Image (cartoon, rainbow, N blue to C red):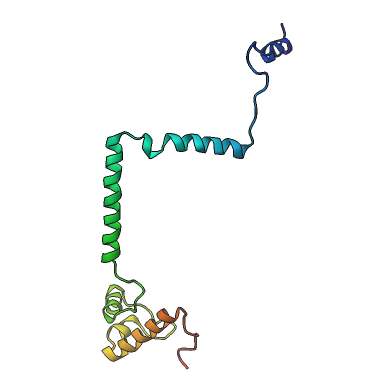
Amino acid sequence: MNAKDIWKEIKKPIKGHPTAVKTLLPNEEANNLARHFATRAAHDTFPEDVKHSLKQLQGQRRQSVLQIKLASTDTDVPFSINEIEAVLRKKKDSAPGEDTFTLSFYTNAPPSFKKRILDFINKSWTQGRLPVQRSWSA
């Protein structure tokens, strides 16, 4: 018996079995699988102790989210002078930037100057845009 004859034997219908298998489109097959697994994973099929644990976790999650919402402060607020000074303390002195000033200039500047810089930064922050760049030396 050669390979061709073997394949003919394999393909012969077996008594009582259908000869053709219905092929589904990929979307139909995916939907069938989704329905099957959705019923298998439904909460009503879980053991009672698992259902009880899930209810407790759900309550704990809600409580945690509520605490986070209450504890979080609004992050869309103007910067404070303390934040500006903290940034200045963390940086090392550097060469002058486009504005021709060094970091030590800003660090040692009087409070009134820092307040003006802070107002400038906050105006840019609240308007959501950077100011038009001009020559710093002009």
Above or below — where is 70 with respect to 78? above
Q: Is residue 110 visible?
A: no
Quadrant for residue 62, please give it. Answer: bottom left
Residue 49 pos. (x, y %): 27, 36
Q: Residue furthest bottom?
A: 138
At 37% across and 39% down in the image, what residue appears? 43
Identify the residue at horizontal 44%, vertical 81% (top origin). Answer: 127
Residue pushed farthest top? 1
- In the drawing, does residue 19 fall left or right of residue 48? right
Picture coordinates of residue 105 (x, y %)? 32, 85
Which residue extends farthest front?
44
Foreground residue, 28 or 115?
28
Q: Residue at x 67, y 14 (%)?
A: 13
Residue in front for this viewpoint, 87 or 67: 67
Residue 125 seen: yes
In this rendering, would 29 be left or right of 46? right
Vertical placement of residue 71 versus 138, above or below? above
- Residue 30 percent across, percent down from the top left: 56, 38
User: Going by the image, does 98 lie left or right of 7?
Assistant: left
Q: Is residue 29 left or right of residue 127?
A: right
x, y percentage for residue 135?
A: 49, 89
Figure label count:
0
For residue 109, which quarter of the picture?
Answer: bottom left
Residue at x-position 63% and y-position 13%: 16
**Residue 104 image-quadrant placement:** bottom left
